[in-house]
Image: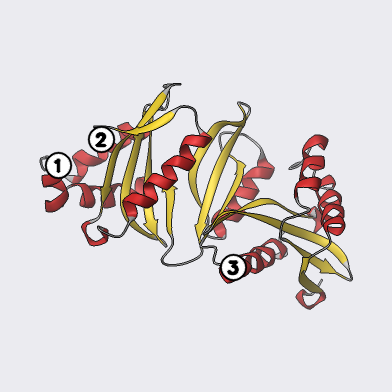
Amino acid sequence: MKNTDLSIVKIESPEEKSIICNKILNFLPNWFGVPEAITEYTEQVKPLPLFACKMDDEALGFIVIKQYSIHNAEIIVMGVLQEYHRQEIGKKLLVVCENYCLEVGIQCLTVKTLADTHPSRSYAKTRAFYLAMGFHPQMILTDYWDENNPCLVMIKPLSTQALNVIQMQNEHIEFIHEVKFCDSNKAALHDTDMTLDEWEAVCYKSMKDPDETNFIIRKGIVPVAWLKINGLQNKDMAWISMLVVHEKFQQQDIGSFVVRFVEEFKFLHFGELLFEK
């Protein structure tokens, strides 16, 4: 198959959207093995933007997005017929989708998939695809679907100015040390100096604590702040225990952005989030 044989088109007919979705998902049992879920997707895609990859008028793959705020959208469902995997169809669909998002002012794109705590080899390939396409883990929602299917939320900024949130990784420890112990923030937080090695030990312990989660706030792909939320095992309440913004990015509405993110986080988890006083 030559790439010149393929075309990416935006499907306008609700009926054709449903037909494409239903057909392709039914041929992907390792990813979409629940008939009720396929039926739900088939109805859900009708009013949403759907792009299909076609060859000789036959759909080989598709992607659907839903805009849920002025600057943010989510990939609701995506699929490529298995015999056409590893032929860059998914990449082509995603590039067209991202260009569409930028045209309508969307700055960040998210997707939900199965977390790596599930042994599925098929979804390991899915995560690898999204990572290769520039998505990063944002959070794991253990009860979003059910306890046997932990949900991983991934995010990709489409603009160098787009504020976005990703899950803290080991690679961010040095950045947090720099932010937390710079002169202005150290004075505000009443902190004493700590070496990077000492801070690493603190972070490794913190990242293993099931009662808290740490996030990195980015502008595009540049880290600008550190957010920590505690009390995740409290069914009634959790709280923001730390928000530290790099001194170069203060007074840029990052605090307001974090509050909006926390509101979204609140609806994805139980209880209310309150600023610790």
Q: State whether residue 226 is above or below residue 224.
A: above
What residue do we see at 80% from left, 64% from top?
Answer: 12
CA distance separating discs 1 and 3: 46 Å
In the rendered structure, which amino acid carries the disc numbered 1? Met
In the rendered structure, which amino acid carries the disc numbered 3? Val
- Circles 1 and 3 in contact, beta carbons < 8 Å: no
Judge the density around disc 2: few (<14), some (14-19), many (≥20) Cα neighbours within 10 Å.
few
Nearest to viewer (mark 2 / mark 3):
3
Question: Would you say 42 lies left or right of 107 here?
Answer: right
Q: Which of marks 1 and 2 is nearer the N terminus?
A: 1
What residue do we see at 63% from left, 27% from top?
Answer: 148
Read off the residue under disc 2.
Answer: 202
What residue do we see at 86% from left, 51% from top?
Answer: 23
Q: How many labels does the image show?
A: 3
Q: Residue 104 carries which label?
A: 3
- Circles 1 and 2 in contact, beta carbons < 8 Å: yes
Q: Which mark is residue 140?
A: none
Judge the density around disc 1: few (<14), some (14-19), many (≥20) Cα neighbours within 10 Å.
few
Residue 181: give x, y in percent of width and height: 16, 48
Residue 258: give x, y in percent of width and height: 37, 47
In the rendered structure, which amino acid carries the disc numbered 2? Val
Which element type, helix, strand or loop, lies under badge 3? loop
What residue do we see at 66% from left, 69% from top?
Answer: 96
Q: Earlier in the sequence, mark 1 or mark 3?
A: 3
Read off the residue under disc 1.
Answer: 194
